[in-house]
C-alpha cells in the first residue's frame, strides 16, 4: 500500500502554496484556505497546514544522524535547470546538484518553513536488488512530465526490524539497497516500496540522536499510510488526526485508499 498523503506544517499557507506550485508544479486540489491546502504530487498529495510555531521552535536537525524524518523526495526531469530557477529565486540549498551513488543526480533545498526537499533525476542502479518486480514497477513509472512525489527518507536504528514492520503492516516491499562506500560512518540506504511510493531508510554504524515529532511546529508533520491503525504510541495533531510514532520517531497516520 502507498504513502497516500504527506502533511507539511507551515506558518503561511498561501506563501507555501505559491512556492510548491511555482517550483514543483504541484497543482492545487479543491479550494485552499488560510488554514489548509492540498496539492497534487501525482503519486500522493502534499497537504499544507497552518501552525503558529515557526522553524525557530523546531528540534529537527539537518544532520542525518538524527533519527526519524529526513526529507521529502521528488522525481524530476531537467534537474539542473530546475535547481537554477530555485537558486535565482534565492531558495536556500543544502546540497547543489551532483551525481550520486546509484547513478542518479540529486540536490537538496528547503521550503519556506525549513522542510528539506530533494529532487532526484534518473533510475537508481541498486547495489543489491531484493525485489526485481518492485524495481521493474518503479522504473516503469518513467520520467515525470512534472515533479512526482517519490519518497520520504527516514533515519532508523535497525533496517531488518523496520522493513519487517512496514512489510507486515502496510505491505511495503524491500526492493533494494544503495551503498555509500566512502562514508566512514557506515552509511547505507534501503528502499521500501509501497504502491508507487517509497520509504527511503538510512542506517549508520555510529550512534544516532532521537527526536520526538512536533505536530504543531512548522516543517514535516506526518505521512498518511493506507491501512489499519497500529499498536503504537499515538498523539493528536492540531487538526484532530490521530498520529502514530514508530520506534525511530517517524510519525504517520493511517486511512483508507479512497
Image (cartoon, rainbow, N blue to C red):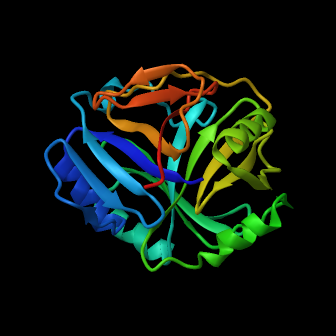
Residue 249, placed above or below residue 176:
above
Horizontal side of 65 relative to 182 (left or right) equals: left
Q: Can residue 140 be seen here? A: yes
- Please provide percent x and percent y for residue 141: 59, 75
Q: Nearer the viewer, residue 183 or 196?
A: 196
Q: Residue at x 81, y 61 (%)?
A: 131
Location of the C terminus (image quadrant):
bottom left
Q: Residue at x 71, y 36 (%)?
A: 165
- Please provide percent x and percent y for residue 39: 31, 59
Horizontal side of 206 relative to 50 (left or right) equals: right
Residue 258, placed above or below residue 167:
below
Numbered marks: total: 0
Q: Residue at x 48, y 63 (%)?
A: 43
Horizontal side of 53 relative to 97 (left or right) equals: left
Q: Quadrant of residue 209?
A: top right
Residue 23, placed above or below residue 200:
below
Horizontal side of 238 relative to 58 (left or right) equals: left
Q: Can residue 88 be seen here? A: no
Q: Residue at x 80, y 39 (%)?
A: 186
- Please provide percent x and percent y for residue 58: 38, 27
Residue 239, placed above or below residue 36:
above
- Please provide percent x and percent y for residue 55: 32, 32
Amino acid at each position: 500500500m502507498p504513502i497516500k498523503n504527506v502533511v507539511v506544517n507551515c506558518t503561511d499557507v498561501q506563501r507555501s502554496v505559491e512556492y510548491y506550485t511555482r517550483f514543483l508544479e504541484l497543482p492545487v486540489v479543491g479550494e485552499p484556505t488560510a488554514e489548509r491546502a492540498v496539492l497534487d504530487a501525482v503519486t500522493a498529495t502534499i497537504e499544507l497546514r497552518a501552525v503558529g510555531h515557526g522553524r525557530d521552535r523546531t528540534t529537527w536537525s539537518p544532520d542525518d544522524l538524527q533519527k526519524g524524518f529526513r526529507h521529502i523526495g521528488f522525481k524530476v526531469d531537467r534537474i539542473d535547470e530546475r535547481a537554477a530557477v530555485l537558486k535565482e529565486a534565492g531558495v536556500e540549498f543544502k546540497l547543489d546538484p551532483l551525481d550520486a551513488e546509484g547513478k542518479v543526480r540529486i540536490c537538496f533545498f528547503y521550503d519556506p518553513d525549513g522542510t528539506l526537499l530533494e529532487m532526484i533525476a534518473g533510475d537508481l542502479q541498486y547495489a543489491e536488488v531484493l525485489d526485481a518486480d518492485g524495481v521493474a514497477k518503479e522504473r516503469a513509472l518513467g520520467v515525470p512530465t512534472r515533479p512526482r512525489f517519490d519518497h520520504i527518507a527516514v533515519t532508523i536504528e535497525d533496517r531488518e526490524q523496520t522493513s519487517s514492520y512496514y512489510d507486515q503492516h502496510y505491505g511495503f516491499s524491500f526492493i533494494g539497497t544503495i551503498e555509500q562506500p566512502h562514508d566512514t560512518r557506515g552509511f547505507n540506504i534501503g528502499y521500501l516500496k509501497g504502491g508507487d511510493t517509497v520509504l527511503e531508510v538510512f542506517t549508520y554504524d555510529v550512534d544516532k540522536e532521537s527526536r520526538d515529532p512536533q505536530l504543531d511546529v512548522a516543517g514535516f508533520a506526518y505521512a498518511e499510510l493506507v491501512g489499519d491503525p497500529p499498536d503504537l504510541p499515538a498523539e493528536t495533531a492540531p487538526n484532530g488526526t490521530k498520529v502514530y510514532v514508530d520506534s525511530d520517531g517517524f510519525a504517520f497516520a493511517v486511512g483508507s485508499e479512497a
